[in-house]
Amino acid sequence: MIALQAMTPNAIADNFHTTRQAVSKHLRILTECNLVKQEQQGREIYYSLEIEKMKEIDKWLEQFRKIWEARFNQLDNLLLTMKKRKK
Amino acid sequence: MNDNLLFDFTVDKAAKTVYITREFDADLSLVWDAFTKKELLDQWIAPKPMTAKTKYQDFKVGGKRFYAMISPEGVERWAIQEYTSITPKTNFKMYNAFADKDENPELPGSDWDHTFSEQNGTTTVSITIYNESLERMERILDGFTKGMKMSLHNLENLLATLSQRQ
């Protein structure tokens, strides 16, 4: 939702079965992680998504996934060797 | 390697949890050994070109494994694991934390849960990794990338070679 446009906590809460307080709490955490940015406009604070940061995380997770893939490929080879040895 | 072997890698960012499921074309007892015996762990746990070295391991509840991942340049990254629960050939849990070379852990660490099951000679391992802090999750990878960044290309080649071998 906030990937499309900056929104206030109230506007976000209206779209879910939740309270503004709950939304604000989530937004605070996301802001701490630099995943959303806030902009003060008059009395309201508007939140929007840091797309680049999200991409960074996905890139990072993709690398993490690759590490596991490589690991398991090595384990496949090891298991094959172990099986042969047992025979 | 068998292309039909399931590999699932899911991250629940909100729950700070990584879920990994992988099938292996081997009996449960072999897979269990590969995950729980240091001489076997050291042969596969470090993604090439890194290597792993276990200094000691005591596989029992309350026991520990103290090991290092070593980069091609010889940089050692130590970690310590404490086994918190063991049900032989079914499940084991541990608490994993980075450490210095004198075994002093850098907290917080992460909780690991491994579940093993076998069906028709194929063994499925499900791993759940819970991290207390996302920031720490990032450091895990950072530890790897430091040793691996320039070697990622090598890794790709390795994967290509491995898949060609089939």
Image (cartoon, grey):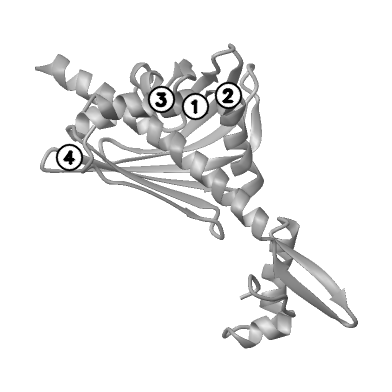
Please state which amino acid type lies under the numbered disc 4.
Thr
- Which residue is nearer to you in this view: A33 or B96? A33
| Residue located beneath label 3 in the image | B157
| Residue located beneath label 4 in the image | B122
Q: Nearer the viewer, mark 2 or mark 4?
A: 2
Q: Are marks 2 and 4 on the same chain?
A: yes
Q: Whole-Å distance between the Cαs marked 2 and 4?
A: 35 Å
Q: Residues within 10 Å of mark 3 (few under 14, many from 20)?
A: few
Q: Whole-Å distance between the Cαs marked 2 and 3?
A: 13 Å
Expressed as whole percent of the image width and height from the top left, the position of residue A31 reads 74, 62
Q: Are marks 1 and 2 on the same chain?
A: yes
Horizontal side of residue B96 vs A81, given as left or right: right
| Residue located beneath label 1 in the image | B153
Element on which disc 3 rests: helix
The answer to whether one can see residue B34 in this image is no
Tell me the quarter of the picture where residue A12 sits.
bottom right
